[in-house]
Image (cartoon, rainbow, N blue to C red):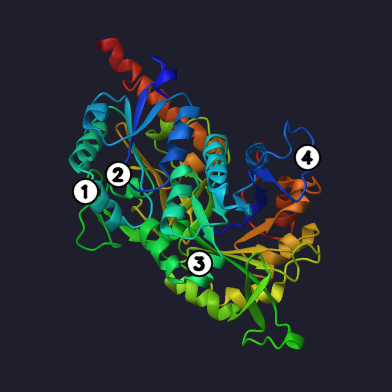
Amino acid sequence: METVRVVPCLDVDAGRVVKGVNFVGLRDAGDPVELAARYDSEGADELVFLDITASSDGRETILEMVRRAAEEVFIPFTVGGGIRSVDDGRAILRSGADKIAVNTAAVDQPELVAELAAEFGSQCVVVAVDARRNNLTAGHETPSGFEVLTHGGRVPTGLDLVAWVAEVVALGAGEILLTSMDRDGTRDGFDIEMLQAVATVATVPLVASGGVGCLDDFAAGALHGGADAVLAASVFHFGEYTVAEVKAHLVSAGVAVRPVTS
Amino acid sequence: MSGSENRDAPLVAVLDYGIGNLRSAQKALQRVGADARLTADPALVAKADGVVLPGVGAFGRCVEALMSAGIWDMAFAGASAAANGTGPPFLGVCVGMQMLHEGSTEAPGVTGLGVLPGEVQLLTGDIKRPQMQWNRLDLRPNTAHERFLAGLGVDPWAYFVHSYAAPVSSDTVATCSYGGPVCAAEARGVLWGCQFHPEKSSSVGLQILENFVNLCCNPVPPVVALNS
């Protein structure tokens, strides 16, 4: 049977979790590895670490975090941020990550997606795509109605979302992590129309991201958006919902998931 | 690691031929009590209490990498001896399990180790490929899994990433349902195979690895030990 994965996402800056964590019982609420191990024990299916460290000397810090995570976390985890070459990807994977995510670097040099897939296999190459609805007043218009952004959602590219996803899938992307920048942080729910538009061309697994505010939002992403995995950050970090609560709600909505057993 | 070497911990050789995320497998084995080493050194593998053959990505590329690392013959000998019960336990994971078979439709003309029969086939049915998700293990009524899949509880789930799978056969000890029954685990003698990733399957996966490490400590069934 096809089951939907529930994926907490940790934004990491210089080895520390950002977006504030309000979690009871952690020794160090800012330690991404301790938080990740906690999500593993609570029944998360997978994790994403997004490294937003701006400084160029931050690579060793993130590698050290990945090495520690490999000792404490026994579910799959993806690491994204700052991967601009096959060597960068290799360093992350050899440190213990299961998948690497590329975003801006893929737009700058699409051949990187093909190179990573050829070197490591598509199954560990995630293309993260940040997108928004066309901003018509700014003159941005793309055929699907959605435009790709880079640099953490700050820079419009003029690329059409659906065409871009089709391109990276053809290049060898093994998974698409789609974030709606219109919804990110709003708690208004995933952009279902955006997910539906991408689901038509994403023959590989699709991870929905950006906008979760309530339990129904998770279910809508899977049931209406066609997502294979649902990702959220704040609602987990602030202890608003546990992974178990999200999964119980998904099951009651008719979405198959791995049950939380412990 | 050399400073913390534990005489009681079984030495598990994780075959390193440049493929995949080996650090996770090593750390998971260490977590359950093994002295796990990433190695392609025949001398170290020869004295290991157990061997793990990992593998991710394409079948043809894994076969090629195993050959160019010069450990193909060693992997064949180890897997064969484990299947016959004459050598230490051997565990193939994901493509490492697929390579135990004769070949794969993913790479026509490329020969697998052929220790287990049959050809690895593309997953069929109205499903997404790859299967990249957790799925429930359905344990088959087959005594071969008594040690392999012991202690998993009534509803064990494991993490899969694959588009191809070995045929379901009399060696199959667990299946999952994905467009039909899919071979999830196999056992013959002390040769084990997991299509899923035990090192990424949380408590269920760690239990399976612990079972393997325990088998490495004591590969001979007690009844045989009594006769010796």
Same chain shared by disc 4 and disc 2: no
Q: Which mark is residue B68?
A: 1
Q: At 70% across and 51% down in the image, what residue appears?
A: A247
Point out the image quarter for the N terminus of chain A: bottom right
- Subunit of mark 2? B
Residue, disc 2? B17
For the point 44% across and 42% down, which residue is it?
A: B140
CA gap between label 1 and label 4 equals 49 Å
Question: Do discs 1 and 4 belong to a common subunit?
Answer: no
Q: Name the disc covering residue A245, or none.
A: none
Instruction: Compare residues A232 and A214 and report the one nearer the observer.
Output: A232
**Residue at numbered disc 4:** A23
Q: Position of residue A33 (x, y in %)?
A: 62, 39
As measured in the structure, the alpha-carbon distance from the residue carrying label 4 to the one carrying label 3 is: 34 Å
Q: Amino acid at mark 1?
A: Ser
Which of the two discs, 4 and 3, sits closer to the camera?
Answer: 4
Residue B111 position, x and y percent, is: 20, 54
Q: Left or right? Give the position of A261 relative to B17.
A: right
Q: Mark 4: few, some, or many residues within 10 Å (few <14, many ≥20)?
A: some
Q: Is residue B86 above or below residue B155?
A: above
Discs 3/1, front: 1
